[in-house]
Image (cartoon, grey):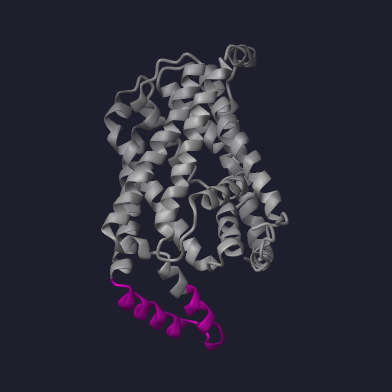
Amino acid sequence: MKPNVKRGLVGLGLTISAIFLFLAFRQINYRDLWHTLQQVQIWWLAPGLVIYFGGMVVRAWRWQYLFKPLKDVSVGNLFQIIMIGYMGNNVFPLRMGEVLRSVVLKRRVDVLISGSLATIVVEKIFDAVVVVGFVLLNLGQLKRLPGGGPLTQVSGLTTWAAAVFLVGLGLFVVIAMFPKPAQRLLHSIVVKIVPARWRESIINVINKFLDGLMSLRSPKDALMILLTSILVWLMETGLYWSVSQAFNLDLTFSQLLLLNGVVNMVLLIPAAPGGLGTFDAAGRVMLEALAISSETALAYTLILRMAIWLPITLLGALYFIREGLKWTLDITEMQAQAETVDSSD
């Protein structure tokens, strides 16, 4: 990516975050906000974090299924790499954590970056299908919310999002089931539109990317990937529940599933690292729709952000430092680091 384009995208993300932060913090009584934060029963976060990190272990287990056609990688190894990736998404712009995951995988188990990126793309599509499913299952409830009038437009957006992600998933399944025809088609496209000097390298990347989709050929593995995806997001909602207990809020689990789903749909909007602003504004608006005061809604969202962001970023940074990687936004330099084998393994 050219430096000017990268700077432009980073600037766009910062601008979007600034707008959403304004929306999150506008018309707030800060004395009431501070008083609400002081009343939080912070010890309630402990069980939520245990459930949340359990969900991260399930993410690693799911990734192991996605990786089966490429290489046998232990769940413990994949867990550490996921922590590094989430840390990267929380501190680097442009969701560079996903590239970082592939870089560390290349260093540790010598899987080409294009192949591992394919598994991450499939993983994200399954995540999106589940998150959108949470919203679709609770759309009736969304329309009945006391302050949910402005949110009814989410219904149409969610339906479109579901269609897009399901089509994407279906396309990947078809490619996985018929890899040779898909490979021939993609190769012919490359030959027609790509200059000769770049064709071989691009074709190699395509081949490895297609290898990363092979887990979808097995109905059993595909079903396990779907089931573990559902479990991942149910366990993440467990942290939402834990924070609601810390505030003594009377929210049902289905309401928390809806909150989790809508917040993560809004996080698809490009913004600063960690969904700064988008997460906070979406959380406040949804909780206000559930008849919770603005100050309590914002306080809940801030504590939830801290619980999601801080522990995983610290643990990911620890693994990152142990990996011996350099902090960089240069993809070429990241790829060069991937060729350096970690001597601690």
Q: Which residues are magenta?
A: 178-205
Quick check: is 225 in the magenta stretch? no
For the point 27% across and 30% down, which residue is it?
Answer: 140
Looking at this view, is 254 or 76 the one in front? Answer: 76
Q: Quadrant of residue 323?
A: bottom right
Looking at this view, is 313 or 302 the one in front? Answer: 313
With 70 as the anchor, is 77 left or right in this view?
right
Vertical comparison of 75 with 4: above or below: above
Q: How many marks?
A: 0
With 16 as the anchor, is 75 left or right in this view?
left
Vertical comparison of 24 with 269: above or below: above
Looking at this view, is 31 or 131 the one in front? Answer: 131
- The x, y position of residue 274, in whole percent, is 58, 41
For the point 35% across and 47% down, which residue is it?
Answer: 129
- The x, y position of residue 70, in whole percent, is 44, 66
For the point 46% across and 61% down, which residue is it?
Answer: 72
Q: Residue furthest front?
A: 345
- The x, y position of residue 114, in whole percent, is 51, 67
Q: Quadrant of residue 37?
A: top right
Residue 105 seen in this snapshot: yes
